[in-house]
Image: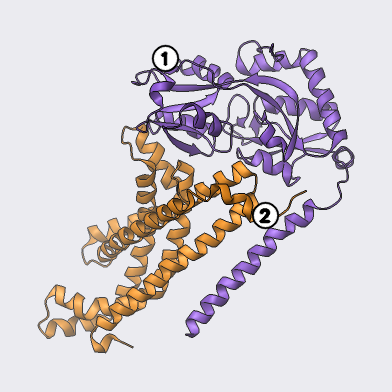
Chain colours: A purple, B orange
Amino acid sequence: MNMVRRRVFGALAFGVLSASFAFSPVAEAQQPQGGILSDVLKRGVLRIATIGGNPPYSSLGTDGKPVGYDIDVANMLAEQLKLKAEFIVVDVPGRITALQTRRADVTFANFTANVERSKVIAFTDPYVVVGSIYMVKKDSPIQSVEQLNDPKYKIGFARGGTAEGISATTAPRAQKVRFDTVGDAYLAMQSGQVDSHLQDSLQNASYVAKDGDKYRNLAGNWSYEEISIGLPAGDFDWWRVLNIFVKNFNASGDNARLFKKHFGYDLPPIQQKY
Amino acid sequence: MYEFNLAGLLPYIDPLPRAILLTLWLSLLAIVMSVAVGVFGALCRTSTNLIPRFLGAAYVEVLRNIPLLVVIYLIFFGLAQVGLRVDGFNSALIALTLNAGAYMTEIFRGGLLAIPNGQYEAARSQGMTGPQLYRYVVFPQVFRIIYAPLGNLIIGIVIGSSLASVIGVEEVTTWMRRAGDETFRYMESFLAVGVIYVVLAQTINIGRIATGNWLLSKAPVGARR
């Protein structure tokens, strides 16, 4: 009996503890917003959320520091604002959480602007436009996405990204296997743990350039995604500054130069004809 | 701007029972298999023969010092790269068993070592055979000694099974991350799953206590306390 009572007490103590953890960020989020622009200028540091394992956008270099196209773009922003750049490496869904919890001032991470995410965070205009492509091993029996849409095949992708919705509409019957990073999902296809990797079309181009003898794409581009800078919702001044940066970055040729440096080919058009 | 709202998770409630069952199944299988590994490992480690003693010690020291996550990656990705493809569930099960088996070995070994040598000699002098000696003298006592530390490890296995989410096993943690990712309600999904793990771990733990009481009631009178 005594043991049972102690057990119940332990469970209660856990509940109280986790509840106190649960509610402290709530209180933080309800504080009046001081304005991110003035905050970062006062701090002198720009806190940038990014992801690892997602080359050539962003990945961790041999010294553990993030490198890649998104990192260079973020550094350029920090430089123009005369701030010190501080990178926070998060996972794919962490790109949103880092902004929601105000751990980061911006997110640079192959980050697609969409309506769903815009309910909780904000986006600038795009600096790259991408699609989504299914990649398979060269000797795979799968020839089309139609054929891939079968419960006997597995599709791998990084959780928390747009691949979740795209795979659900384009291959609803296939099994989905979710990984922590794009790199893990690619590795899973390489090692045969999944049959196909659903990936960003520009990333796909660089994978094809590198490993084109081992893998091939299934026909079709399954999304239109505007890659943008993410920022916390509700701060017009901060959005204004970032959007001017994006416009200048696109117009000045800096974007074209950085893109070519990391992807190895020319930046595809950002303006879409509808 | 942010308001705590558990109801935000409701659209994701359908796949939850399946995810809970998978966590439970993975944990139970890992517990049963690691107990088997542990008993065998402990018998090796306490053997009078040098070779099994060395192999047992090597197994424990290597597996106890590699993080479970690394073992999972090794089996799922590493083995697949050399051509041996083990699916997500089985990779996690093998990794959990290997990891927990090392700890089980130490727990069972501790139990075996607590039995004084004199008891073996006394049992032999009464004409007991090897299996009889273990069945009637050694194991009933060992069981009582390892009963409590076993509980800790069992909870550890249930909690450790959450790492299966990194290789896409659709258990509770995967559910939590998906529900969080799609509703942006991380606090709610993390908290809900925290509570689920407490309930799961305690359910299995109560099962352990009940099994223990039952086994002890079967033990010879002298071994009860």
The chain carrying label 2 is B
Between A65 and B221, the residue placed more toward the observer is B221
Q: Is residue B136 above or below residue A169?
A: below
Between A219 and A40, the residue placed more toward the observer is A219
Q: Is residue A73 above or below residue A38?
A: above
Q: Is residue A89 visible?
A: no
Query: Which residue is drawn at the image coordinates 53% and 20% (left, top)?
Result: A204
Between A9 and B120, the residue placed more toward the observer is A9
Looking at the rendered image, the disc whose residue lies closer to the viewer, 2 or 1, is 2
Amino acid type, callout 1:
Asp
Question: Hey, which quadrant is residue B28 in on the image?
Answer: bottom left
Picture coordinates of residue A266, whole percent (x, y): 65, 10
Secondary structure, mark 2, is loop
In the picture provided, is A71 more to the left or to the right than B14? right
**Dot label at residue B215:** none
Amino acid type, callout 2:
Asn
Picture coordinates of residue B140, whole percent (x, y): 27, 79
Label 2, label 1: how far apart the Cα atoms are: 50 Å
Residue to which mark 2 is pinned: B5
The chain carrying label 1 is A
Question: Hey, which quadrant is residue A67 in on the image?
Answer: top right
Q: Is residue A253 visible?
A: yes
Query: Which residue is drawn at the image coordinates 39% and 34% (left, top)?
Result: A193
Residue to which mark 1 is pinned: A213
Picture coordinates of residue A57, whole percent (x, y): 63, 26
Secondary structure, mark 1, is loop
Q: Are the residues flagged by discs 2 and 1 from a single subunit?
A: no
Question: Hey, which quadrant is residue B111 in on the image?
Answer: bottom left
Query: Which residue is drawn at the image coordinates 28% and 56% (left, top)?
Result: B55
